Image (spheres, rainbow, N blue to C red):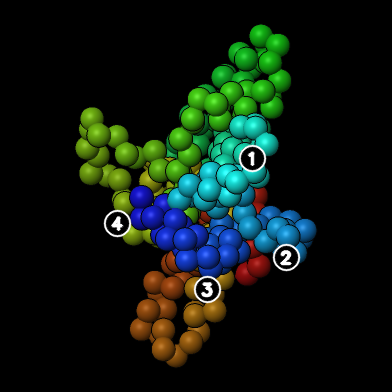
Amino acid sequence: MLRHTLTYQLFKAEVGLPLISFQLKHFVDSVSNYTSAGSTSLVTLGYGDIGEMLSKDGNRKGDKKSLRRAAELEAIKTAHNPNGTYYGGKANEHKKGLIKTFSGYMAEGYTEEEVYEAMVDQGVAIVYMGQGICYGNRAEEYDSSLPCIGSLRCNPARCKQAVVTTKHAPKWREVYTLNKLNLNKPEYSHNREQVLAAMNEARMVLENLGEEVEL
C-alpha cells in the first residue's frame, strides 16, 4: 500500500516515469528502454493507478491495449511462466502448479498467450516485494519460523514460503554489488563479517537463478 501511495503522489507531482521506476527499483530490461521514449519499466505502470490515468483522455485504445493491462501482463508472464526459473522454498511447488495448469488449458486448445491474457482478465494478484514474492501472508495460521524481519532475510534460502524469479535478479545483484563495494572500506571494518555474509547470501540467490557473479 505504501508503494502504491508513493507512486500515486510522485505521479501527481509530475516527477516523470523514469524517476518513479527508479524509486520503486523497477529495472528496464533492454537497451531500447534507456532511450527517452522508453526508460520506464512496464511494471511501474501497475502501481498507484498511473497506468489507468495515462490511458485516459483519448489514449486508451480499448481495454486490451491499456497501459495498466500491459503492465499486469508483463508481471504475470514473469511470475507465472511454466518454463520460468524459480528458486526458494515454494519454487518447486509453484512451478509444478503452473505446469499442471498450463498443460490442462493447452490440451483444451488454448495457447500459452491466451492463458496469460485470461489471468489478466481474472485479476490475478501480483505483489513484488523487491527481492522476491512472499507466500507467507496466510491469515489462518501463524508460523514463527518465517524470518520476515528485514529485507536481507527475504531470501529463498532462509524462507520456505519464498519464490524468486529472474525479475528479482537486479535487486539481488544490487545487494551483492553494494556490499562488495563496502567490504574493505575502513568505516565498515566493524561490520565486515555482516557485509561479507550479505554478499554471500546475494551471490547464492543469483547463482541459483543462473546468473553470473563476478567475484
Residue at the disc numbered 1: 60
Work out whether mark 1 precedes mark 3 in sequence or the reverse, and give the earlier one.
Answer: 1
What amino acid does circle 3 point to?
Answer: Leu
Indicate the quadrant containing the C terminus: top left, top right, bottom left or bottom right: bottom right
- Sequence-wise, which precedes: disc 4 or disc 1? 1
Query: Helix, strand or loop at disc 3?
Result: helix
Q: Which dot marks residue 50?
A: none
Q: CA distance from mark 3 to mark 4?
A: 20 Å
- Point out the frontmost of discs 4 and 2: 2
Residue 209 at least partly seen? no
Front: mark 2 or 1: 1
What kind of element bears circle 4? loop
- Bin the neighbour count of mark 1 within 10 Å (Cα to Cα): few under 14, some 14-19, many 20 and up: some
Residue found at x 48% / y 87%: 185
76 or 195: nearer the viewer: 76
Q: Is residue 146 left or right of residue 37?
A: left
Q: CA distance from mark 4 to mark 1?
A: 42 Å
The circle drawn on residue 36 is 2
- Tell me the residue that label 4 is attached to: 149
Residue at x 67%, y 23% (from the top left corner)? 114
Q: Amino acid at mark 4?
A: Ile
For the residue marked with disc 2, what is the amino acid? Ser
Q: Nearer the viewer, mark 1 or mark 3?
A: 1
Q: Is there a contact, CB below 8 Å, between mark 1 and mark 3? A: no
Q: Earlier in the sequence, mark 4 or mark 2?
A: 2
Q: What residue occupies the far front of the structure in this picture?
A: 57
- State the mark number for residue 178: 3
Q: How far apart are the alpha carbons under marks 2 and 1?
A: 21 Å
Q: Position of residue 41 (x, y in %)?
A: 62, 54
Percent position (x, y) of residue 51? 55, 47
Residue type, mark 1 in image: Arg
Alpha carbons under labels 1 and 3: distance apart: 41 Å
